[in-house]
Amino acid sequence: MNIFLYLDENTLIHRLDPRTKLVSAVILFGICLCFNHPLYLAFISGGVVLTALWARALPNFWRLRYILLLLILFSFVLWPFFVPGPTRWWAWGPFQVSRESVLYGLAMGLRLATFVGIGLIFLSTTRNEELTNGLIRMGVPYPLAFALSTALRLVPTFAGAGATIIQAQVSRGLDLESGSIFKRMGKFIPQAVPLFIYAIHHTNTLAMALESKGFDPQAKRTFYYEPRMQRVDYWVIGFFILLLTALLYLRLGMGLGVVIRGRL
Amino acid sequence: MKGIFTMWKNTRMIILTAVCAAIYSAALLAFKTAIPLIPGITEVRVGNIFPMPFGLMFGPAGAWGSAIGNLIGDIFGGTLTPSSLAGFVGNFLLGYLPYTLWTNLVPFHHKTFRWEAGAWLNWVAYFIIAFISSTACAVVISIFVDFMGVVPYKVLVKIITLNNTLGSFIGVILLTSVFKLVKDHLQLYWGDVMEEADQGKPIAGPLGAWLVTIASLFGLFGGLLADFQVGILGWISTAAILIGSFLL
């Protein structure tokens, strides 16, 4: 089963240093938090979609289209009941819906979908090895990054084993579709135990293999993959910092892009 | 607390962390959408049966493994957002609190962890700790997610608590099935893998345990007792849970 989101393309975004993509994604997350007015967030969402188009990441957006739409719908329906606003439209007992709360719900739906969109662009343009290498170069301790990269490498194997175990049990007549939540969840135990035992047997073998090769978690290391920050990387980071500063000024200095005060 | 830092010196603990993370995220992926609660938004996370047994058997490796596993679940699921950071901390607690509360939550505490299915006190402690660690995880994630405007705290804290508690309760079957294999056959119980000096001792164990317990319950039920503002309720509880965890 293919569970990777990386799309092998040759775009400028693919070629950026992983640190640039990590920092840019964090700044873009910050940009999404600048406003809670749907119109302003729609512009940001539009920008993210254009970036996805540029990065040729739209196949992954299509793959997750239902989740993205449901996220917008879920926030739009839920938030109006939890954030009071001055222009009341409807009230019933403790529940009330106002013009501002509806706009806020729409904005939060857009924000949530944009968050997912930014993450998708990052994952569509960055290999797992680049991600862990970027984290190490940004100061994440090597043993932690090593655990992350080892886990990333093991997941497809274990997920495939999990899927095979489920299919094998279902073909023998196990019914996972009926019963209460408790019963249905309990039915997954016969799948979980063999998956766990299959996986945990790797531990001692892997540890021995590493120790026999002289693995020392504390040792200083060198890497085959040595990305270098290019001029374009600094330009991209500089652009996003400037954009964030300008948008913060719009929100904090001019009070624009706000429907509910006191909330991000 | 010391053990969660010193474990990174130990190759076996590092591999255990990676394997725990891979099992957890593989289960999150393989069993995703098996039992949807709100289609596309949240489902009964069958993978949640793992963090509590991981924490009890593998200690710090189980805690880090749960945190990294949840992050990888977000990476492969395409939902890598700022909420993933909260998910990392919350799932860390879901694996960290079980083994620390097991020896510190007076009067339900035990001297060491050894799962005996025949001892009813083990079951009592297991279910109490499962509920507390599930709630602590839910409070920490929900307040951060609410702060960013993703999902309201009052809704999410209940969904996550239910999900985690349900998963942890069912996880006892997994623990019962594999504990002897892990401890006696594979010799991967964390207390046997790590040097005693590296395991560390709690700063103020029972105080930390009860601080986490009270803060978790306050975060979940505080809104029912008095008209607390969500922000105050969630942030105070989160701060107390983190301080309590530090003391453990």
Image: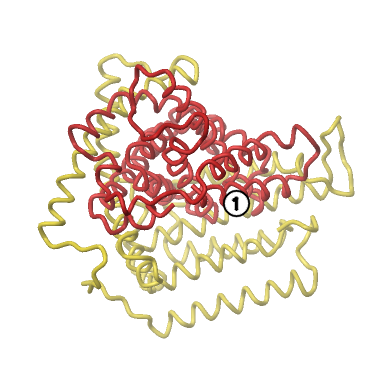
In this rendering, the answer to whether A23 lies above or below B64 is: below
What residue is shown at x 38% (from left), y 83% (from top)?
A230
What is the number of callouts on the image? 1
Q: Colour of chain B?
A: red
Nearest to the observer: residue B40 or residue B189: B189
Q: In front: A46, or B169?
A: B169
Q: Position of residue B169 (x, y in %)?
A: 45, 26
Residue B66 position within the rendered picture, expressed as x and y whole percent measured from the top left: 40, 44
Is residue A103 left or right of B76 when viewed as pictured? right
Name the residue furthest left. A212
Q: Chain of mark 1?
A: A
Chain that appears yellow: A
Q: Residue at x 39, y 49 (%)?
A: B64
Q: In the displayed structure, does residue B223 sit left or right of residue A125?
A: right
Which of the 4 image quarters holds residue B230?
top right
Residue at 68% x, 65% y is: A34
Place of residue A67 in the rendered image (x, y in percent of width and height, measured from the top left) = 52, 43
Residue that badge 1 annotates: A112
Name the residue at the bottom extreme.
A231
Mark 1 surroundings: few (<14), some (14-19) or many (≥20) residues within 10 A: many
From the top left corner, tell me how far across and down residue A70 is, in percent. Answer: 58, 41
